[in-house]
Image: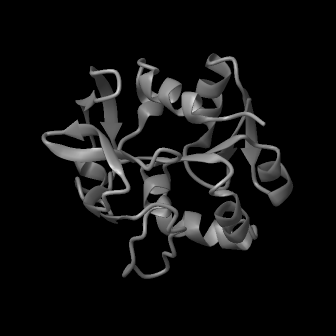
Amino acid sequence: MKIGVLALQGNFENHYNKILDFGKTPVYVKTKSELSKCDALIIPGGESTVMSKMIDFNNLRQAIIDLKDEINIMGICAGMIMLSSTKGYNNLKTLSIMNFKVERNGFGRQVNSFKSKIKFLPSNNDINVSFIRAPKIKTFSDKNQCIAKFDGNPVMLTDGRHIACSFHPEFSLNNDIYEYFTNLVKVS
C-alpha cells in the first residue's frame, strides 16, 4: 500500500514517519506523477492559504479532484480546510471534496494551541491529540458522519472514503486514526 503525503508545505515529515511505522510505503507527493502512484493521500497541517497556492503552483488541484473517487484522502488541520467546501476567505480556494464548512482558527490562534483528549468513536478510545490553530466545523451534510468529538463538538468527519480532522493525530502515541484510515484504503 502506497500512501502519499502532500509535501508542498506544512508538517508532512511526521505523517511520512507514521506511515513507515505502520509498515506501509510512504510517498512524498509534489507532482502529478508522484500522486498517480498512490493508493491514498494525506494532506497535512500547515497554512491553508499557502497550501492552496502551492497546490495551484504545482498543478495538482485538478489531479487531486480527479482522483477523489479512486483514492482515499485524509486532511489534517489545514488539510481539513482544503477538503472542505468552505468559501469566503481571501487567497484560499478549497478542493470541495467533502460537504462541510469550517471556521479557520476556530479553536484559537497559534498562542491558543493545546493538547487534549478526543473521543474517537470507531474504537471508543480516548486519544491525546494536539489542536494547533485548529479549524472548527461549522456545518456538515448528512453524507458525512462525525467520528470524533472534543467537548461535545465534532472534530473529525468521514464520508466513508475520506477523513477530515481538526487536530493533529501525528503527534499522538495512539495509532487508531491511522489504522482506521488505512483500513478504508482499497489497494488495486
Which residue is at a point 49% across and 80% down the rendered structure image?
A: 91
Quadrant placement of the N terminus: top right
The answer to whether 18 is drawn above or below residue 106 in the figure is: above
* Farthest right residue in view: 33
Count of numbered circles on the image: 0
Is 64 on the left or on the right of 49, as rendered?
Answer: right
Give the image's coloring scheme: one colour
* Farthest left residue in view: 152
Which residue is at a point 86% across and 54% down the rendered structure image?
A: 33
Is 101 on the left or on the right of 78, as rendered?
Answer: left
Quadrant placement of the C terminus: top right
Is 92 on the left or on the right of 110, as rendered?
Answer: right
Which residue is at a point 63% across and 57% down the rendered structure image?
A: 68
- Where does the image place residue 58, in percent across and percent down from the top left? 75, 67
- Where does the image place residue 167, in percent across and percent down from the top left? 36, 42
Quarter assignment of residue 117:
top left
Residue in front for this viewpoint, 177 or 20: 177
Is 91 on the left or on the right of 152, as rendered?
Answer: right
Residue in front for this viewpoint, 51 or 150: 150
The answer to whether 45 is drawn above or below residue 177 in the figure is: below
- Where does the image place residue 56, in percent across and percent down from the top left? 68, 73
Residue in front for this viewpoint, 162 or 15: 162
Which residue is at a point 43% across and 63% down the rendered structure image?
A: 84
Quarter assignment of residue 105:
bottom left
